[in-house]
Image (spheres, rainbow, N blue to C red):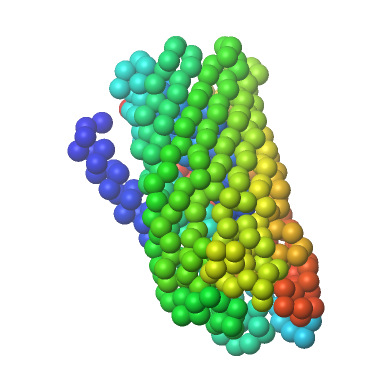
Amino acid sequence: MSKTKLFRNTAIALAVAGPLTAAMATNGYFSHGYGMKAKGMGGAAVASTDNAFAGANNPAAAAFAGDRLDLGLDIFMPSRSAANTGSNAGNSGSSDSNVFYVPEFGYNRALSDRMGVGLTVYGNGGMNTDYPKNMLTGTAGRLGVDLTQLIVAPTIAYKVSGDHSIGISPLLIQQQFKADGLSGFAGYSSNSAALSGNGYDTSSGIGVRFGYLGKVTGSLSVGVSYAPKVTMTKFSKYAGLFAEQGAFDIPENYTLGLAFQATPDVNVALDYQKIRYSQVAAIANTSTTVGTNSLGASNGPGFGWTDVNVWKLGAEWKSSPNLTLRAGYNVGDNPISSREVTFNILAPGVITTHYTLGGTYALSKQTELTVAYMYAPEVSVTGANVLGNGNDTIKMSQQSLGIQFGWKY
């Protein structure tokens, strides 16, 4: 592929991803997988080399992935609802926003037998709700938040030997956020003018992801991926909402995984992922200090999320020369405890289990079409209202359906 074509394809991907990258919540607010092949495998991908999403999954995979381009779109369909049993009894409703379009783009190029480079553009995160009435106060007026993230990850990987590689991906991150319907908390904010209804604000930062991939035997591969915490610029329009005057950083996360070629036609993958939400005050600070600590202060209330441990198990079967079928299971911790329910009406990221199916059909020797489906059954959490107004309940379920075109050249 020429440099002109590469730059053209990258520009197209960025233009598409910019307006469409959508908020989601699966493993906390991280996606359950990146790339449709991974999504069909329950997200297990850190030891895989059959796609161009090294920048999201494991930078070291770029040394093995060859020359390919992957372009996909995931239709993400969450269902969110909330209810109160106190003086606001009968105040229940569902979020109106329930369909999001999440594009993904991956490019990989082998520069030599030992070195590969790539570019991954993907959406990660966030929190999104859009209630037609104020579920926090029981009054008229819309309530909701919208957090989206776009990550551009150029990648370089090098084989230190024939079967072992290391890689690195700088992460160029752009966030966008808005909040509506929170003016009732003005008396609890350190800066009520920067609390709610200020439209979209943006935040940016630069991080990094490191990776290792090794083929231990002819049938067993091992992968490791690590991204330290990313310090983002602050959301100044919401300095009276997020702790530390509008800070909303990206938490440290890492993944360890295995891929085992059980037979020539059957491959099994298992990943373990840790997401350290406790490192980010705006996410991790308890919401129960409302009235004691001011929103937006350094020790201000947050969403009370805890760290999440995720297990991802996937299997694929090459049922014919042209068709590969996949299935997966993804299970993780619920980051939201019962005492943190009220604030998480805004961000009910309570999902713990995902079931996935997928497949790839070879259209030709150079082209393929991949689809992936995910179903996450409903999870609910009930707890005391943070202002002493009875109990609140939040619920969430999810589905997604994605399609991806792959070109090997």
Considering the image in quadrants, where does the N terminus appear?
top left
User: Total label count?
Assistant: 0
Q: Quadrant of residue 301?
A: bottom right
Q: Nearer the viewer, residue 210 or 213?
A: 210
- Residue at point 80% right, 78% down? 390
Q: Nearer the viewer, residue 347 or 294?
A: 294
Q: Nearer the viewer, residue 145 or 249?
A: 249
Considering the image in quadrants, where does the C terminus appear?
top left
Residue 398 coordinates in the image, percent (x, y): 64, 57
Instruction: Residue at the far left: name it.
Output: 4
Instruction: Residue at the far bottom: name it.
Output: 140
Q: Nearer the viewer, residue 187 or 98?
A: 187
- Residue at point 68% right, 42% down? 309
Residue 353 in view in this figure: no
- Residue at point 67% right, 52% down? 306
Q: Is residue 4 above or below residue 307?
A: above
Residue 62 lies left or right of residue 36; in this view the side is: left
Q: Quadrant of residue 364?
A: top left
- Residue at point 41% right, 58% down? 233
Residue 408 coordinates in the image, percent (x, y): 37, 29
Residue 59 coordinates in the image, percent (x, y): 45, 31
Residue 394 lies left or right of residue 211; in this view the side is: right
Q: Is residue 36 above or below residue 244?
A: above
Residue 394 coordinates in the image, percent (x, y): 71, 67
Residue 140 in view in this figure: yes
